[in-house]
Amino acid sequence: MPGNTETGKPMKNKIKVFRAMHDLTQEDLAQAIGVTRQTILAIEKGKYVPSLDLAFKISRHFQVNIEEVFVYDEAVLTVTVD
Amino acid sequence: MKKNSFYLIVGCIALALLAIFWYFVEVSVEVHRPFIIEAAFIVAIVIIYFVRKRVTDINEDERSAKITEQAAVRTFQVFWVIFCAFSIGAVMQILYVPTFPREHFEFHTQELLGPKMMGYFQLGLLCLMFFLYVAFRIYYARKYGDWETDEE
C-alpha cells in the first residue's frame, strides 16, 4: 500500500483489506461515515491523509483499533529522509 | 434546494447584474453615482451567499474543504505579493518619488498608472485571481486524488 509520498508522511492504511473482509464497497463505506467515495479512494491510494476524526470514524466502523487500520511506518520515513 | 437550481439562480443574478450595470453606467456617469453599481454587486453576493447555504445536495467533506482551503491560501499568497508590488509603485507615484536614473524622470508613468488605469489594473488583478484560484483548485484536486480511478 502506498504511503503519502507527497507530504513525506509514511502513513499507510489497510482500509481496502478491511473493506474486503466486511464485503463493503467504497461507496458503502463512504456513506456510512459521511464522506464521498472519492475521499475513500484517495485515502486508500495514499493521496490523502485523513484527519484524526475521520480515521477514528473509519476504524470504529470496522470495530477495530485505529492502529490496526492506519499504520505510521517510521521505517519508510527513515528511508525517505536518508 | 438542488444544486442545479442554485446554479440557475446564480445565472439569473449574473444576468440581472449585467442588466443593472448596462442600464446604470450611463446614469452613474451622469450623476456621478457609481454607488448604485457597487451596492447592486454587494447585494448580489449576499443573496448568492444565503442561497448557497440552502443547497442540500452538495457533497462536501474534509478533503474537499482542504482542497478549497489550500487553493484559497495559495491564491491569496499570490494576490498579496502582486497587490503589494503594485501598491508600492502607486504610492511612489503619489509621493513623486523620482525614477532612477534621473534622466528618465520625464517618462510618463503618471498616465500609465493614473486613477483610471488603477481601476482597470484592479479589475484585471481580480480576474487573474479568479483564474488562478481555478487553476490551484484543479492542481490540489489532482494532488488529493480527485480524478483517481479504481479497479472497483
Image (spheres, coloured by chain):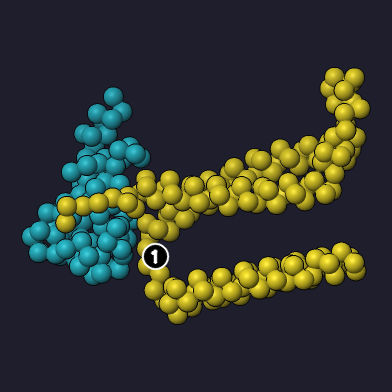
The answer to whether residue A64 is visible is yes
- Mark 1, secondary structure of its residue: loop
Q: Quadrant of the N terminus of chain A?
A: top left
**Along the viewing direction, whichever of B102 and A8 lies nearer the viewer:** B102
Which chain: cyan?
Answer: A
Instruction: Locate residue A26 relative to residue B103 in the image: left or right.
Output: left
Of all chains, the one bearing label 1 is: B
Q: Residue at x 87, y 64 (%)?
A: B29
Q: Quadrant of residue B40?
A: bottom right
**Along the viewing direction, whichever of B111 and B75 lies nearer the viewer:** B111
Q: Residue at x 23, y 70 (%)?
A: A32
Instruction: Locate residue B140 relative to residue B34 in the image: left or right.
Output: left
Please tell me the colour of chain B: yellow
The answer to whether residue B42 is visible is no
Instruction: Locate residue A9 relative to residue B64 in the image: left or right.
Output: left
Q: Quadrant of the C terminus of chain A?
A: top left
Whether A46 is drawn above or below A23: the answer is above
Instruction: Locate residue B34 relative to residue A63 in the image: left or right.
Output: right
